[in-house]
Amino acid sequence: MPGNFEKVDYEWLMDRPDSNNYAKKLMRAAYNTAIQVDPKVSKICMRSDVHVDTVVGGIKQKDPPHITVSSKTPEQEQAGTHVTAHGYTPELNSLNITRVSPNNHEKLDSKMNPNTNSPYWPANLPKEPKKF
């Protein structure tokens, strides 16, 4: 059975917003995206705020407004793997997730992202305190 928003661990690959209120809203949008990929999600990597582009095959292209999140189940935590999904929003200033597009290809956390030359899910990312 799915956990709830507060029981999931959140890590920040992107810069955490200064506003705690906005950070919590963004985390909730990430949670709403991740549970549609797998309801057993236990950890979420906050990859981006709402944006309108994506990279496919190394080529940047326009995409409707969305957030990008990676997530793990307990089994994926043990295996050192994750999946990534886009949570689409109706507009740039919205965090209302209306559609989710998962990339069902599991990646090793340590796999290097050719666009950033760093791991897709680096070790020791800043973690969100459990009390927020």
Image (cartoon, rainbow, N blue to C red):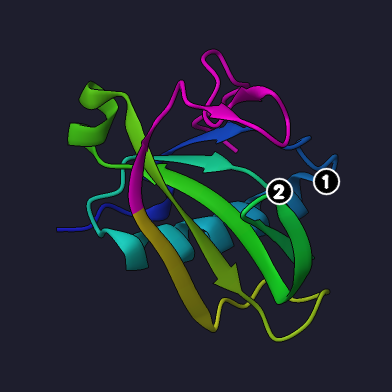
Locate the N terminus and report the quarter of the image it occupies.
bottom left
In terms of secondary structure, where does tag 1 sit? loop
Nearer to us in this view, 116 or 4: 116
Q: Residues within 10 Å of mark 1 (few under 14, many from 20)?
A: few
Residue 17 in the image: state x and y as whole percent.
Answer: 80, 43
Residue 104 in the image: state x and y as whole percent.
Answer: 33, 58
Residue 63 in the image: state x and y as whole percent.
Answer: 72, 74
Residue 122 location, quadrant: top right
User: What amino acid does circle 2 point to?
Assistant: Ala
Q: In the rendered structure, are the residues bearing label 2 and label 1 in contact, judged by CB atoms less than 8 Å apart?
A: yes
Nearer to us in this view, 118 or 95: 118
Question: Which of the numbered marks, if any, corresponds to residue 19?
Answer: 1
Question: Which of the numbered marks, if any, corresponds to residue 100?
Answer: none
Based on the picture, tell me whether residue 108 belongs to the magenta stretch. Answer: yes
Q: CA distance from mark 2 to mark 1?
A: 6 Å
Q: What's the magenta bit mostly, secondary-structure-wise?
A: loop
Residue 58 in the image: state x and y as whole percent.
Answer: 68, 49
Instruction: Identify which residue is drawn at 60% across, 55% down.
Output: 68
Question: Which of the numbered marks, if any, corresponds to residue 23?
Answer: 2
Instruction: Identify which residue is drawn at 74% across, 56% down.
Output: 59
Above or below, comparing residue 82 to residue 123 in the picture: below
Based on the picture, tell me whether residue 50 belongs to the magenta stretch. Answer: no
Query: Left or right: where does residue 129 sit relative to residue 82?
Result: right
Above or below, comparing residue 98 to residue 86 in the picture: below
Instruction: Identify which residue is drawn at 56% across, 76% down.
Output: 97
Magenta residues, as a range? Answer: 105-132
Res 51 seen here: no
Locate the C terminus and report the quarter of the image it occupies.
top right
Nearer to us in this view, 110 or 75: 110
In terms of secondary structure, where does tag 2 sit? helix
Res 46 seen here: yes
